[in-house]
């Protein structure tokens, strides 16, 4: 379907949904069923608020959504969230989130408020760390805050926040009294031949609650489209992979008395994967005359966390509630790459070709201690109600990386080496925030000003593995926001928010250095400035008995945007291309989003429990880049922007709650070539002509259903890409040449299915 067709059809549907949801505004009927805007968020304001009370756009996914939609990973999680995407490079799998064109470390990821490890991507297949340390079976809710949120969440939230909340014992137990719960769940997904088994135990004995969740997952590579043809000799199938994942979540929580509650949390997740990178066998590595004869990967990721918390309902003069937590976390990525190629050990006159086997062992580790203190105080006055929230956060993070290269045959001109691409670093950060939710005009108007101060003090350490002298520097910043929600009627409301974002430079952006004679020299830049942003978001909402709808417009401007730029050729021999991360200005992103749900039983007399959901996202971004000659190019398209996307879903949940399902239609417009900067080559696989591949538009249909044959057993099944459509996701192929022969390897799975059964005791 073409771009104009999608725009006309789905913008019309959006308007219809808004009209339907607001048709009975004057009647001010109470909502008989929960709507999208009745969901609760904490991440947007640090206090519990329904979505229709927040002055920004937030998406909430519950554990019930995760189960019914057969969500296995973070890619599945945002399948029906236009404006939010996940990148996948094949070897490391699903990695980072992309929110409105901001991705990687510009999006903050938290689990129970604990910051997650940074991503690092050197564009090398053997040197990448991702941020996917999450298991969906242990998640209670996921909140996606779109746009800068540094006033609440500090640095790294310049593009938005993805906040995961893990399950608690109370989620499985009766509200009061001693109780026990147990469940077993098994599932299978044909897209990656994955078997998943989960066991859950929960108990309350007096005032002590406990919970243990264990998940085991065994999978293969995610299949490309079954009908993907192969151009030339390039591999069109996914590279063979074996994946094993273990995840454990344990919690103990004790209600000391009516005012005090304490808890202990332990998490452990480890993933191992073995990949036969057949797509690289026969390719010629940069700077080498001989192609690879072998290319294999043995990768692992591991995250461990221990945390304690204390909740106090004090209602003192200084605060009503107090919550503090202390968490220790360690995240590690280990990539082992084994490759073989022919090398000439005899020289030009008498060439002797020998097989050279090389092992590369890359480790990236982050270890952190994080302390958070959050307090609230409510005060009532004659003309206004104030809900103050304030607190502080302290984090000490240690970053380590090590790269070992071993040449097995060890020809005379090669040697084994060990080194770091960046120095050892310890970063201390402190944040203090204050926010006031002011309710005026008989609860019609809510104004929320907020301010935050952040300070960052990195300390680096050179050693025999990283000898470049670096200069440490500290950063501090004030971030502010001002939001307002006004209720025109009991159904219709409007909202607006101005917010600032702030992001400190990554250690790798500042200190990463690589020298390959005759090929490349990546220079460190310890003088980088923090990224900053200003965002304006305005919208209109309707929330009534027929459903809900939200229409949002946003405009974001970024300064000191950190990007790797080309500085030209070196003057030394052998000549190499010089690259460095630098600050660039004039990056802007604007867009419009719509989401809504309509209760068809209330609106048109359909069977009770029938609903229609719609979501649309469109954005456009421009920024500054450098061309192949190192020249600055202004007003270039941002290639991180996804094409126009729309999702329409028809759902049914029987009043008995014993069965139901959804039929989802996803439509994505083609990527306009005018919206692609040909100077932004994000991949080593771009062709010499610089003509990047523009993904065609597509439409896919999915169907999921659940059924409870007896009270304690739930059967769930889903069929995805029912029409067996061949398509590519833009985020997966951006930077690839249109003439690249391996494009078919990036296609999404054809028709596939998932099934699961859950037995609760």
Image (cartoon, rainbow, N blue to C red):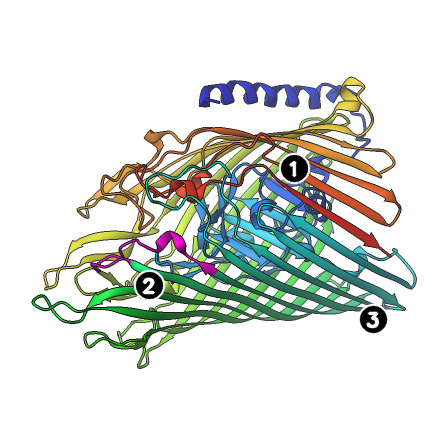
Q: CA distance from mark 3 to mark 1?
A: 48 Å
- The numbered mark at residue 256 is 3
Q: Relative to 353, is 224 on the left or the right?
A: right
**Which residue is at the front of the view, 644 or 214?**
214
> Which quarter of the figure has residue 382?
top right
Q: Is residue 497 above or below residue 257?
A: above
C-alpha span from label 3 to label 2: 47 Å
- In magenta, the rendered stretch is 275-291
Counting labels gives 3
Is 289 part of what is drawn in magenta?
A: yes
Q: Which residue is mark 1?
A: 719
Give residue 494's position: percent from left, percent from top.
61, 31
Majority SS type along the magenta span:
loop
Which mark is first along the chain, 1 or 2? Answer: 2
Label 2, residues with CA under 10 Å away: few <14, some 14-19, many ≥20: many
Side of 297 where 571 appears, left or right: left
Residue 273 coordinates in the image, percent (x, y): 52, 62
* Label 3 CA crowd tier, 10 Å (few <14, some 14–19, many 20+): few
Percent position of residue 557, x then y: 40, 41
Q: Earlier in the sequence, mark 3 or mark 1?
A: 3
Query: What percent of the width, then of the height, locates residue 323?
Result: 69, 64
Look at the numbered disc 1 and give the secondary structure of its residue.
strand
In terms of sequence position, does the residue under pointer 3 or pointer 2 come before the other? 3
> Does the magenta segment cover residue 749?
no
Asked if residue 530 shows in the view, the reply is: yes
Residue that label 2 marks:
510
């Amino acid at each position: 379907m073409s771009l104009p067709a999608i725009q006309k059809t789905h913008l019309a549907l959006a308007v219809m949904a808004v009209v339907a949801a607001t048709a009975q505004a004057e009647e001010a009927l109470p909502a008989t069923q929960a709507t999208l805007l009745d969901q609760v968020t904490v991440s947007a304001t640090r206090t519990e608020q329904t979505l229709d009370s927040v002055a920004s756009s937030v998406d909430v996914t519950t554990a019930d959504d995760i189960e019914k939609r057969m969500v296995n990973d973070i890619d599945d999680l945002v399948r029906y969230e236009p404006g939010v995407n996940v990148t996948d490079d094949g070897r490391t799998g699903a990695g980072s989130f992309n929110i409105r064109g901001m991705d990687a470390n510009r999006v903050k990821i938290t689990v129970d408020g604990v910051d997650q490890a940074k991503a690092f991507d050197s564009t090398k297949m053997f040197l990448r760390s991702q941020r996917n340390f999450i298991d969906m079976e242990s998640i209670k809710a996921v909140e996606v805050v779109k746009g800068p949120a540094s006033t609440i969440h500090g640095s790294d939230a310049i593009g938005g926040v993805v906040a995961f909340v893990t399950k608690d014992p109370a989620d499985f137990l009766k509200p009061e009294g001693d109780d026990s719960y147990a469940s077993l769940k098994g599932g299978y997904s044909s897209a990656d031949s994955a078997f998943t088994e989960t066991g859950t135990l929960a108990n309350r004995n007096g005032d002590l609650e406990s919970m243990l969740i264990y998940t085991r997952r065994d999978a293969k590579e995610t299949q490309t489209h079954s009908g993907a043809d192969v151009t030339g000799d390039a591999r069109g199938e996914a590279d063979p992979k074996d994946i094993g994942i273990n995840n454990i979540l344990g919690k103990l929580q004790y209600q000391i008395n009516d005012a005090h509650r304490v808890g202990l949390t332990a998490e452990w997740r480890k993933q191992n994967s073995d990949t036969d990178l057949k797509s690289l066998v026969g390719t010629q590595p940069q700077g080498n005359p001989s192609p690879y004869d072998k290319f294999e990967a043995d990768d692992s990721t591991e995250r461990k966390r221990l945390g304690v918390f204390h909740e106090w309902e004090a209602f003192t003069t200084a605060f009503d509630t107090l919550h503090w937590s202390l968490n220790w976390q360690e995240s590690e990525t280990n990539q082992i790459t084994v490759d073989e190629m022919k090398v000439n050990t005899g020289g030009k006159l008498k060439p002797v070709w020998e097989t050279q086997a090389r092992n590369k062992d890359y480790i990236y580790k982050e270890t952190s201690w994080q302390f958070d203190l959050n307090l609230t105080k409510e005060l009532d006055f004659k003309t206004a109600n104030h809900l103050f929230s304030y607190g502080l956060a302290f984090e000490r993070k240690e970053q380590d990386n090590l790269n070992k290269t071993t040449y097995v045959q060890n020809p005379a001109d090669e040697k084994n080496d060990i080194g770091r691409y960046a120095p050892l670093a310890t970063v201390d950060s402190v944040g203090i925030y204050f926010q006031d939710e002011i309710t005026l005009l008989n609860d019609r108007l809510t104004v929320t000003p907020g301010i935050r101060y952040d300070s960052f003090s990195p300390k680096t350490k050179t050693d025999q593995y990283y000898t470049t002298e670096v200069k440490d520097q500290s950063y501090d910043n004030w971030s502010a926001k001002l939001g307002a929600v006004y209720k025109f009627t009991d159904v219709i409301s409007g909202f607006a928010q101005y917010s600032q974002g702030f992001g400190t430079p990554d250690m790798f952006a500042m200190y990463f250095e690589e020298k390959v004679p005759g090929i490349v020299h990546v220079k460190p830049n310890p003088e980088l400035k923090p990224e900053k942003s200003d965002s304006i978001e305005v919208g209109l909402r309707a929330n009534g008995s027929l459903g809900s709808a939200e229409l949002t417009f946003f405009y974001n401007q970024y300064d000191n945007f950190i990007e790797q730029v080309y500085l030209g050729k070196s003057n030394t021999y052998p000549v190499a291309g010089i690259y460095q991360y630098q600050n660039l200005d004039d990056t802007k992103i604007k867009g419009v989003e719509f989401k809504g749900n309509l209760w068809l039983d209330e609106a048109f007399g359909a069977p009770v429990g029938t609903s229609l959901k719609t979501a649309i996202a469109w954005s456009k971004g421009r920024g500054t880049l450098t061309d192949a000659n190192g020249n600055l190019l202004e007003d270039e398209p941002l290639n991180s922007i996804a094409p126009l996307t729309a999702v329409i879903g028809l759902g049914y949940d029987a009043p008995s709650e014993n069965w139901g399902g959804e039929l989802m239609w996803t439509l994505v417009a083609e990527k306009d070539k005018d919206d692609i900067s040909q100077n932004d080559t994000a991949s080593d696989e771009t062709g010499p002509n610089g003509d990047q591949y523009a993904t065609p538009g597509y439409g896919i249909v999915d169907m999921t259903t659940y059924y409870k044959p007896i009270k304690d057993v739930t059967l769930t099944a889903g069929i995805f890409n029912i029409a067996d459509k061949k398509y590519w996701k833009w985020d997966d192929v951006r930077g690839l040449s249109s003439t690249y022969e391996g494009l078919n390897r990036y296609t999404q799975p054809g028709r596939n299915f998932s099934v699961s059964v859950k037995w609760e005791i």
